[in-house]
Amino acid sequence: MSTFFSSIGHISDGALGRNGRLMFCLLDKKLLAEQVEHSILYLWDNAKLGKPVNLPWTSAALCHPGWPNIEFVAVGKHGKIACLSSDGSCQEIDLKERFPAEVDYLIRAAKVIAGAIYIVGTAHKMFRLTSSLDVENLSVPEPQRALCGYSTGFEAVDGFDENEIYAVGWEGEIWLFNGNSWVQMDSPTNLINTSVLCAADSQVYIVGQMGNMLIGRRDQWHIVATEVDADLWDIAYFDGHIYCCSMKQLFMLNGELLDPVSLAPVFPTTFAKLHSVGHAMLSVGMDDMVLLAAGKVLKII
């Protein structure tokens, strides 16, 4: 299966579900070369591969919300949302139809927080999708939003609950949403923040360009001297440790240093997204998808 998928496309994301189920998104190499918008979603059910779900748009994020009626949710970079049930049915939502905007934007990430999916993007956009498939626009309002357009705004989001949500992005930006309003925090960096984690140790971890890592909470932040030069793309809490990754390496935080992690015996060579649920973590790269659970490393792709 690994050879088949690597020969036809690249993996862009994956999400862990329940009872040995997960979903991943494949981008076809030929369609990419022709600049055709698309996403191919596959369900992996205890080593059995389901039929592909073809979407006519590019997915920016996959989530498993844990809702009884919806198993996985794919969020497209242009605001399309596909809500997939375990029986194979799909309900679609279009954010830009529901909330027309004067300034166009791109969706960059989505995260399940307190039972809802929070979706963020450029132009400091944030939306909340609930289990009833209601959507609320929680974007940073004007004139509070200082920057706008495709190239600025939020790259990632996470939260401890609906009243303490962190959105991070370009120029080192860190924003705090308290359930009603936004406050921009003073940031010790101007590098792009690419991912944020509200960890079980009650700390917030942010990673980004050139090995940049911040640790803090609310208005207190400090830079971690990781001694890593590569851009860091994602971060997760798994089995009591903080993990993050560049495009070529998985790291574990040890004090304030990032130690490379060897995923023997499978040795993946590509990384980009990390998804942790309970005692399992999924590592997704362009050509590799690896599951860490029960002290074992399983190569899926």
Image (cartoon, rainbow, N blue to C red):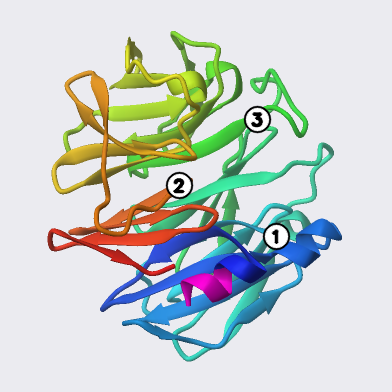
Question: Which badge, 2 or 1, is on the more N-terminal residue?
Answer: 1
Residue at 41 percent of width and 34 percent of height: 196
What kind of element bears circle 3? loop
Which quadrant of the rendered structure holds the C terminus? bottom left
Quarter of image, res 249: top left
Q: Amino acid at mark 1?
A: Thr
Question: Which badge, 1 or 3, is on the more N-terminal residue?
Answer: 1
User: 10 Å neighbourhood of mark 3: few (<14), some, or many (≥20)?
Assistant: few
The percent coordinates of residue 11 (x first, y second) are 56, 60
Residue at 45 percent of width and 36 percent of height: 246
Please name whichever residue, 186 or 76, is drawn nearer the observer in this view of the structure. 76
User: 10 Å neighbourhood of mark 2: few (<14), some, or many (≥20)?
Assistant: many
Distance of label 1 from label 3 (alpha carbons) = 27 Å
On residue 30, the disc is: none
Question: Which badge, 2 or 3, is on the more N-terminal residue?
Answer: 3
- 117 lies left or right of 290: right
On residue 58, the disc is: 1
Please name whichever residue, 134 or 72, is drawn nearer the observer in this view of the structure. 72
Q: Is residue 264 above or below residue 74?
A: above
